[in-house]
Amino acid sequence: MSHNMIHHSVHIRRRREDIFTVLADPERHESKWRPEVIEFRQVNDGPVGAGTRYQVSRQLMGRRSDASVEILRLEPPHMGEFHGTAGPFTFWGKYVLEPADGGTQIDIEARIGTKGATEAGASATLGERFKTAMFSALLRVGIVVFRREIAVDFRRLKTLIEAPTANQLFGFPESP
């Protein structure tokens, strides 16, 4: 397993179709369970699916952070996969939803890297070695932050989706 791979799982007492509706429509739902999200805007035309691109703006520690995200695969109500860039970082993620114990098990995989990072060999200039060391340190911090964000965000999603107000908040149909 790569050191930059993140795995997280959460069980939510809700049908996977409902959870998938929230995860697969970030333009409508992302800011409800990720309060740092200011905007999640689709930038190309057409229905949401593979190839859909988004521009994302977040407020983190008093600073604005922008990202580009593209959906790679969307298989309702089972799985979504995406990749993107944010500043010097690249990221990839996938979530898989499976019915489990009267609810849904969500397994999340994510990977983070840096744009333009190269290995600095013995013949590398001092500047190249410095740049590589800087990217390496930045990546280590990014992994820690990304891992924590995923855990916190999905804990919040669980709380909101399991709440009595979830039908109203997310527009779920009333249970029979």
Image (tube, helix red, strand yellow):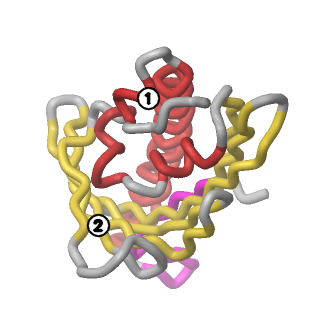
Magenta part of the protein: which range? Answer: 110-124
Q: Main secondary structure of the magenta part?
A: loop
Label 1 packing within 10 angstroms: few (<14), some (14-19), many (20+): some
Looking at this view, is 78 or 58 the one in front? 78
Which label lies toward us, 1 or 2?
Answer: 1
Q: Name the amino acid, label 2.
A: Tyr
Q: Position of residue 128 (x, y in %)?
A: 39, 74
- Residues marked 1 and 2 touching at CB (< 8 Å): no
The quarter in which the N terminus is drawn is: bottom right
From mark 1 to mark 2, how far is it between C-alphas?
A: 26 Å
Residue under label 2, please give it. Answer: 54
Q: Position of residue 85 (x, y in %)?
A: 36, 66
Q: Name the amino acid, label 1.
A: Asn
Residue under label 1, please give it. Answer: 167
Q: Circle 1 — which element?
A: helix
Q: Does the magenta run of residues contain 115? A: yes
In the rendered view, tell whether residue 157 sits above or below residue 126: above
